[in-house]
Image (tube, grey):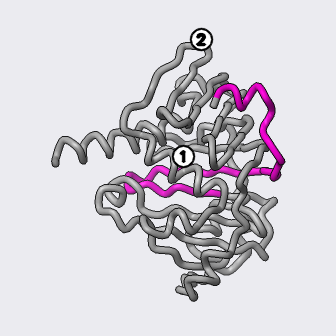
């Protein structure tokens, strides 16, 4: 049992690290500080449980979508975040392709036979025991809260809460709704304190708060499409 838990936690940590997809060593001048929300806004923590049906229908799930992302990985030992940008393609029936273009090209692919990474040298590697974790990530990115309900406790909050006020970019609207997902599983809870999803009809901002004090912030711009490009489908 201990070995299985260690493998699971290792997979979580590795996936979170891969989501930086550049590494703080190579970030260099591309590292940028994510703009904080205005400090003049009064912070009033307000996390309110709501009726399950209302909460689960907060976001319109994206079955097939493509778009771009800006990701900032904050480490407690660094003054500035590691910033990466790229494209995201997801199909609930096939998987997802997370391609980082800057600062260093790399790709993370989830498909039926597992989770894989492709580095800037085009070398592919499978990430063991990480498929369930990556599936949770895809559900979060697509706004499919129903798929997450069994593994997380859900609660609604406003963008003025103590969690969101400091991390949303200036482009975030104060009218956005935020949903906090707290892990029910003790193993997940050892690594992830809370996941926060914010947006209008779809998820536009995602923040992963780790128990270590590190956090990953992702700003999404996704659009529903009829099907993914052929070149992407062939990778899945």
Left or right position of 163 against 168: left
168 versus 94 height, above or below: below
227 or 195, which lies in front? Answer: 227
**Would you call the spot at circle 2 few (<14 residues within 10 Å), some (14-19), or many (20 or more)?**
few
Q: Is residue 85 magenta?
A: no
Name the quadrant containing residue 192: bottom left
Total count of labels: 2
118 or 76, which lies in front? Answer: 118
Q: Position of residue 189 (x, y in %)?
A: 35, 60
The residue shown at (61%, 51%) is 217
Q: Position of residue 188 (x, y in %)?
A: 36, 56
The residue shown at (30%, 56%) is 187
Q: Is residue 207 magenta?
A: yes
34 versus 89 height, above or below: below
99 versus 40 height, above or below: above
Q: Position of residue 153 (x, y in %)?
A: 45, 73
16 versus 63 height, above or below: above
Hey, which residue is sitting farthest left in the picture?
1
Measure how far apart labels 2 and 1 are at the Cα level. Answer: 26 Å
The residue at which mark 1 appears reads as 74
Q: Position of residue 203 (x, y in %)?
A: 70, 61
The disc label shown at residue 121, or none: 2
Image: magenta residue range: 206-235
């Amino acid at each position: 049992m201990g070995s299985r838990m260690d493998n699971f936690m290792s997979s979580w940590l590795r996936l979170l690290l891969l989501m930086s997809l550049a590494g703080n060593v190579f970030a260099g001048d591309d590292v940028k500080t994510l703009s904080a929300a205005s400090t003049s806004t009064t912070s009033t923590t307000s996390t309110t449980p709501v009726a399950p049906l209302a909460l689960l229908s907060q976001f319109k799930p994206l079955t097939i979508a493509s778009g771009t992302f800006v990701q900032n990985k904050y480490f407690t030992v660094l003054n500035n975040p590691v910033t990466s940008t790229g494209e995201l393609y997801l199909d609930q029936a096939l998987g997802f392709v997370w391609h980082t273009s800057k600062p260093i090209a790399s790709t993370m692919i989830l498909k039926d036979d597992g989770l894989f990474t492709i580095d800037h040298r085009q070398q592919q590697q499978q990430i063991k025991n990480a498929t369930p974790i990556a599936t949770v990530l895809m559900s979060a990115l697509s706004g499919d809260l129903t798929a997450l309900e069994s593994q997380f406790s859900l609660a609604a909050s406003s963008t003025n809460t103590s969690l969101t006020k400091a991390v949303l970019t200036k482009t975030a609207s104060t009218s956005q709704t935020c949903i906090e997902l707290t892990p029910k599983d003790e193993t997940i809870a050892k690594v992830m304190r809370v996941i926060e999803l914010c947006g209008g009809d779809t998820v536009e901002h995602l923040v992963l708060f780790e128990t270590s004090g590190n956090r990953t912030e992702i700003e999404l711009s996704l659009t529903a499409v009829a099907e993914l490009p052929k070149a992407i489908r062939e990778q899945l």
